[in-house]
Image: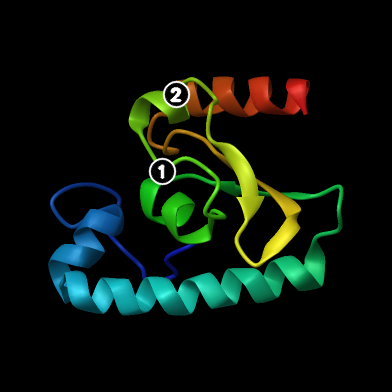
């Protein structure tokens, strides 16, 4: 989980958009910075060179990706084209899939990525 701030399961206060609506964009950016550091620490502690980090939404992907990786786009996520490495930890693979609320596309992309990895 990238944003560890609890949110409602659906609109108008659901997900990252709901958190942003509640605390504002500046506070969300600060929260993302802290969460990024938290994920890096967890990756260094629990992932080896054969492991990977999976991002399930735009903010997570854009915050965690190394500069060489493409920026998030819905189309690229749906087509399993968002692959790269974790910023600051280039030994760790980073993948992005469609949001879990899109269960079918999310499952398909995860399956495709792991079959080709």
* Left or right, residue 115 beside residue 85: right
User: What secondary structure is marked by label 2?
Assistant: helix
For discs 1 and 2, the disc positioned in front in the rendered view = 1
Q: How is the image coloured?
A: rainbow
User: What secondary structure is marked by label 1?
Assistant: loop
Q: Is residue 68 above or below residue 73?
A: below
Q: Position of residue 52 (x, y in %)?
A: 73, 48
Q: Position of residue 77 (x, y in %)?
A: 45, 30
Pointer 1: what residue?
Answer: 71
- Residue shown at the point (79%, 73%) measured from the top left: 45
Quarter placement of the C terminus: top right
* Left or right, residue 73 beside residue 104: left
Residue 78 shows which numbered tag? 2
> Distance between the Cα atoms at labels 1 and 2?
14 Å
Please tell me which of labels 1 and 2 falls first in the chain: 1
* Left or right, residue 113 beside residue 62: right
| Residue 68 visible in the picture | yes
Q: Nearer the viewer, residue 27 or 17?
A: 27
- Residue shown at the point (60%, 61%) measured from the top left: 87
Q: Position of residue 103 (x, y in %)?
A: 46, 28
């Amino acid at each position: 989980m990238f944003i560890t701030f609890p949110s409602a399961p659906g609109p108008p206060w659901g997900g990252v958009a709901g958190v942003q609506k509640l605390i504002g964009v500046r506070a969300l950016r600060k929260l993302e910075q802290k969460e990024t550091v938290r994920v890096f620490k967890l990756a260094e502690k629990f992932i080896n060179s054969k492991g990977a980090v999976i991002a399930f939404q735009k903010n997570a992907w854009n915050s965690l990706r190394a500069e060489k990786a493409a920026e998030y786009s819905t189309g690229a996520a749906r087509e399993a084209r968002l692959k790269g490495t974790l910023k600051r930890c280039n030994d760790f693979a980073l993948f992005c899939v469609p949001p879990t609320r899109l269960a079918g596309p999310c499952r398909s992309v995860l399956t495709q990525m792991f079959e080709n990895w």
